[in-house]
Structures are given as C-alpha cells and as structure tokens.
Amino acid sequence: MSDHLADIKKYAKKPVNEAALAGLEKTYRLVLSHADSRFVACSDPNEVETVRENFLKKKLALSGGDLDGAIKSVCQAMKDERNKSRLTFYYLLAEHFDKLGQFSA
C-alpha cells in the first residue's frame, strides 16, 4: 500500500483516506495484478470509455455530470506520469465525486 499511498499523495487534494485506499486495493486486486490492466492509458479512447463505463457509471453509480471532464482532469493532473496507476486514477476520480466513503469498510 505504501507505493500507492505515496503516489496518491502527489495528486490528492485532501489528506489520503487510507481506509478507502485499502478498500480500493482489495476491490481491484485482480486488475492490479495484471500488467496490461495495471495502468490507465489516457490517450486510448477505449480505455477512457472503460474508466467511464465500468468505474464511474457501474462502480460509483454516476450518471450525470461531466464524467469525461473528470477523466480528462485526472489525466491532466497525472500528465507527467508515463504509467498512470489505475489505483491512483480511480482514487482521484472517487475523491473528485466525493465517493471515497463507499470503499471505506
């Protein structure tokens, strides 16, 4: 968790919710274990669609608002990272939409 914690601290607007981080790690353990799904590729439209449909809409139950704008915002914040950690990316999106609580168990 410490690697993810340090990465999230670079971008989070508030102190890191470590319980939510632990919940995200548990939820996405399988995804994070595969090299091809461990990172988010902002330049790939299919990847952006996957983040929007599977994480924002299905997992966070969001339907309105500017979902693509939020994804672009996180892409912009992490632009200096060649390999954008999916866990950090999802944490930042959940923080943006004030949904970290659903991962704190």
Image (cartoon, helix red, strand yellow):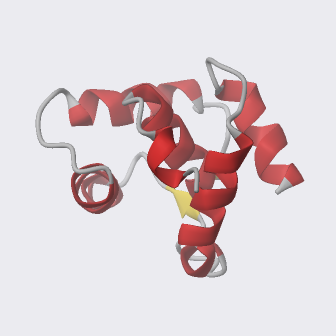
Query: Which of the image's four quarters has the N terminus?
Result: bottom right
- Relative vertical location of residue 9 with respect to residue 54 in this rendering, above or below: above
Image coords of residue 41 (percent x, y): 47, 54
Q: Nearer the viewer, residue 38 or 105?
A: 105
Q: Residue furthest front?
A: 105
- Relative vertical location of residue 4 with respect to residue 23 in this rendering, above or below: above
Image coords of residue 86 (percent x, y): 56, 56
Q: Nearer the viewer, residue 44 or 35?
A: 35
Which residue is found at the position 61% from the left and 18% from the top? 13
Image coords of residue 29 (percent x, y): 62, 75
- Relative vertical location of residue 35 with respect to residue 5 in this rendering, above or below: below
Image coords of residue 20 (percent x, y): 61, 47
Q: Nearer the viewer, residue 8 or 40?
A: 8
State left or right for residue 2 relative to residue 12. right
Residue 27, by quadrant, is bottom right
State left or right for residue 5 relative to residue 17. right
Residue 16, by quadrant, is top right
Which residue is found at the position 49% from the left and 42% from the top? 101
Which residue is found at the position 55% from the left and 43% from the top? 91
- Relative vertical location of residue 14 with respect to residue 63 in this rendering, above or below: above
